Image (cartoon, rainbow, N blue to C red):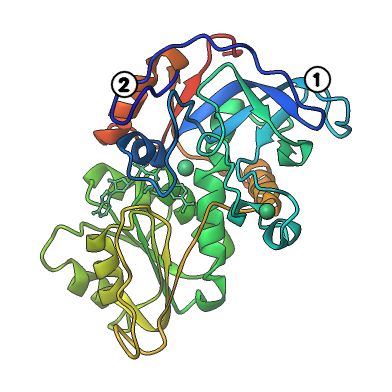
């Protein structure tokens, strides 16, 4: 399913099956997750913009279908999760294992054709993580929604002791994983924020101590009261709009962290002493390969998953409009016709 132009519906298109490069691997897609970033890409408001026709899809699991002659660690038939942050492999950041931060930005579905297809061409075997017996539909959101929120939570673990509060903004695909990782990796009490009543219920089911509607006029006071007036030790914003980042600035406490994950185009209000003393702010970008291994291990050991909503790949436009209209409870997942169901 290809994107023919900004804002246009995806269209079915026959492309030749990819052949692996000498060091590359072709993966038969078993499941492809639909991320809100795909809507930003379609709308032409993402930081990186595709050319057309474009194949979206950066959450991918599948089965190895072909390998290049230099590939050693995977074989045809292996079940794999695809790490999507493909970089050059050679620069300082890539060598440090932070390949998703590489300036090459050749990421699956964003800088190279992605997983809304029967096959995806992966440039190197190092981008594959063994999936084992994890169910492909349940596992596919781990590769971005899980991985990105895992990294974002880890960035604030040091300040999230048992007497602290985390404010977690947005309870969609990323935010739901984020609530689970907050429970598994930190001792903080988590206050969720979402405009949707259904998502606030989901947040409470995932362990949040409270769930606040930010469109209420007293939302900031309500959150600050929940933190006993101290403010949050960390705010992780999975929406990232100016509204939510302004809220983040008003609920963060002294020495607190603000982590921007959502691509909502907002700017964090931090200067000397304002909004509080020694507030730090960072963005958080996807996750690295080691973190994806950890996310997959946690999924296996702790059954970490969110609700998934499967669609045939041919119904990708319905999945995208359901996501846009708030009708996806967790993650929409596309299934190519050839994938085992
Ligand atoms: P989603 O559509 O599944 O979830 C978004 C959630 O935010 C929904 O529950 C919605 O009700 C809620 N929401 C919307 N506006 C809100 C507001 N003003 N206040 C509070 N809640 C609000 O989206 P997703 O797939 O989880 O993605 C979330 C964001 O993260 C998107 O902007 C996406 O592009 C971005 N993203 C960033 C990275 C990264 O590397 N930083 C990776 C993946 C996705
Ligand atoms: Zn994404
Ligand atoms: Zn690099």
Residue 12 percent coordinates (x, y): 43, 11
Residue displayed at 68% across by 23% down? 27
Q: Is residue 173 left or right of residue 98?
A: left
Q: Quadrant of the C terminus?
A: top right
The residue that label 1 is drawn on is 76
Residue displayed at 59% across by 56% down? 101
Quarter where residue 118 is shown: top right
Residue 207 percent coordinates (x, y): 42, 55
Q: Nearer the viewer, residue 69 or 336?
A: 69
**Image height check: is 56 above or below 167?**
above
Assess disc 2: are there few (<14), some (14-19) or many (≥20) residues with their C-alpha within 10 Å of its C-alpha. Answer: some
Q: Nearer the viewer, residue 32 or 70?
A: 70
Q: Is residue 63 left or right of residue 53?
A: right
**Image height check: is 303 above or below 28?**
below
Q: Quadrant of the N terminus?
A: top left
**Total tally of numbered discs in the picture:** 2
- Answer yes or no: is residue 132 visible: yes
Quarter where residue 168 is shown: bottom left
Asked which secondary structure carries label 2, the reply is loop
Residue 6 percent coordinates (x, y): 32, 31
Residue 189 percent coordinates (x, y): 42, 68
Residue displayed at 72% across by 37% down? 128
The residue that label 2 is drawn on is 9
């Amino acid at each position: 399913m290809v994107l023919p132009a900004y804002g246009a519906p995806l269209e079915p298109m026959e492309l030749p099956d990819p052949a692996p490069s000498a060091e590359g691997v072709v993966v038969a897609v078993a499941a492809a997750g639909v991320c809100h970033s795909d809507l930003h890409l379609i709308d032409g408001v993402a930081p990186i913009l595709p050319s057309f026709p474009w194949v979206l899809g950066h959450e991918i699991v599948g089965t190895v279908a072909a390998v290049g002659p230099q590939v050693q660690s995977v074989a045809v038939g292996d079940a794999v999760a695809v790490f999507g942050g493909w970089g050059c492999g050679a620069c300082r950041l890539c060598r440090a294992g932070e390949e998703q931060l590489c300036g090459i930005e050749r990421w699956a579905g964003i800088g190279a054709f992605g997983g809304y297809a029967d096959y995806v061409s992966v440039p190197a075997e190092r981008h594959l993580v063994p999936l084992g017996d994890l169910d492909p539909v349940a596992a596919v959101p781990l590769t971005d929604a899980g991985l990105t929120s895992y990294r974002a939570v880890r960035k604030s673990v040091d300040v999230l002791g048992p007497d602290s509060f985390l404010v977690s903004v947005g309870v969609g695909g990323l935010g739901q994983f984020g609530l689970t990782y907050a429970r598994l990796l930190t001792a903080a009490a988590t206050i969720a924020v979402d405009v949707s009543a259904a998502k606030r219920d989901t947040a409470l089911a995932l362990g949040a101590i409270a769930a606040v509607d930010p469109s209420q006029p007293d939302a900031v006071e309500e959150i600050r009261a929940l933190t006993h007036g101290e403010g949050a030790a960390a705010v992780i914003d999975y929406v990232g709009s100016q509204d939510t980042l302004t809220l983040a600035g008003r609920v963060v406490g002294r020495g607190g962290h603000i982590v921007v994950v959502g691509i909502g185009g907002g700017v964090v209000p931090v200067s000397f002493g304002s909004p509080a003393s020694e507030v730090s702010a960072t963005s958080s970008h996807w996750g690295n390969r080691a973190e994806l291994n950890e996310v997959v291990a946690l999924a296996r050991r702790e059954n970490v998953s969110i609700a998934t909503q499967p669609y045939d790949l041919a119904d990708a436009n319905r999945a995208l409009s359901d996501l846009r209209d708030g009708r996806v409870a967790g993650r929409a997942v596309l299934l190519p016709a050839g994938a085992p169901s």
